[in-house]
Image: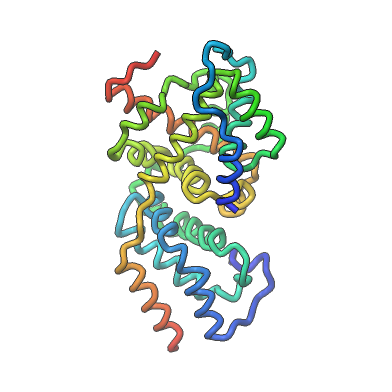
Amino acid sequence: MNTLNKWVIKLYEPMSNPDQSHMKQDCQNQRDCMQMLQLIVDGEASSEQKEHFLKHHLEECMPCYKNYHLEVAIRQLLKTKCSDQAPQELVDSIKAKVIQNLAH
Amino acid sequence: MELEEETPKQHYSDTEKQNIFNNEFMPHINSMYNFAYRLTLDQDDSKDLVQDTYLKSYRFIDSFQKGTNAKAWLFRILKNSFINDYRKKSKEPSKVDYQEVESYYNSEEVDRQITPDLRVEALKDMIGDEISNALNSLDVDFRTVIILCDLEGFKYDEMAKILDIPIGTVRSRLHRARNLLKEKLSEYAKQMGYKTI
């Protein structure tokens, strides 16, 4: 399910080098936009919402464009830096304890 | 017992139990360990917590319906064990008053303060423990939603079940957690010499 969401986000990925001179420098609806952005990044937005926000709004609104890329970058950083692996001894010890339980 | 509430009790044979345990539970061991570690912030505690959780999951395996969301089921057990057994003894400061925190962070005031001055370029230079330290510095409940959502990819409704809170609270807590994380990251960015406007 998550893979699918990532795929959908990719599909609607806004252009990486928008023409900044034509973009708004202020967003009138920043609060609402931040909420929409959150839904999109979390894979909870509908395809219409995604289409509108990523394809139309982001291309004309500088603050939202920046926020979107910041959110995506933070998530990538979290994924690469904050995923610790279980030590092998823990895995072995759990397996051994469960087998022990089975024997009783 | 909270694990027995929703699904009717199953009656698995020993072989079935072992299959479920090995094929549906054990594949989540890394995610479970990471969750435990980020909750307790202590390697020994996190090992104990994960082991306790897995032993419990085996003991209550008849309450698990084969083929349903094992990861969410395991995370819920781990989170409950943490609250019941570890939170009390951990060095974590006493639980914050949620009403107070939630209403504070809900106010328009805080939204206006959001610092969008943190830039992607600054994040790219955070190649050390900055993000990990920033995450660990958040209050445990804020840390939790970020882990569940951003690291583990749980949906809002799954998070609501794991944490026993309404979906609206999941969303507002996430929103606040991310703002706090960004504030922390902005501090690091400043220390690294990135100018904020």
Task: Note whether B80 is above or below B54 in the view shown.
Answer: above
Q: Is residue B32 left or right of residue A81?
A: right
Q: Nearer the viewer, residue B91 or B75?
A: B75
Residue B182 image point, x, y percent:
43, 29
Location of residue B8 in the rendering, given as x and y in whole percent from the top left corner: 69, 72
Q: Is residue A34 left or right of residue B33?
A: right
Q: Residue drawn at (59%, 24%), measured in percent from left and top?
A: A58
| Residue A12 sits in quarter | top right
In which quadrant will I find the N terminus of chain B? bottom right
* Image position of B109 with respect to A81: above or below: above
Question: Can residue A16 be seen at all in this image of the molecule?
Answer: yes
Residue farthest toward the bottom in the current orientation of the protein: A103
Question: Quarter holding the C terminus of chain B?
Answer: top left
List x then y, in percent, for residue B148. 51, 48
> Which of the pair B190/A51 is nearer the observer?
A51
Looking at the image, residue B19 sits to the left or right of residue B35; the answer is right
Q: How is the image coloured?
A: rainbow
Q: Nearer the viewer, residue A38 or A66?
A: A66
Q: For the point 30% across and 59% down, which residue is it?
A: B44
- Count of labels in the image: 0
> Where residue B117 appears, x then y in whole percent?
43, 20
Residue B163 in view? no
What residue sits 47% from the left and 29% below the top? A70
Judge by depth and name the residue closer to the eye, A13 or B47: A13
**Quadrant of the rendered structure where residue B76 is?**
bottom right
Residue B107 occupies quadrant: top right
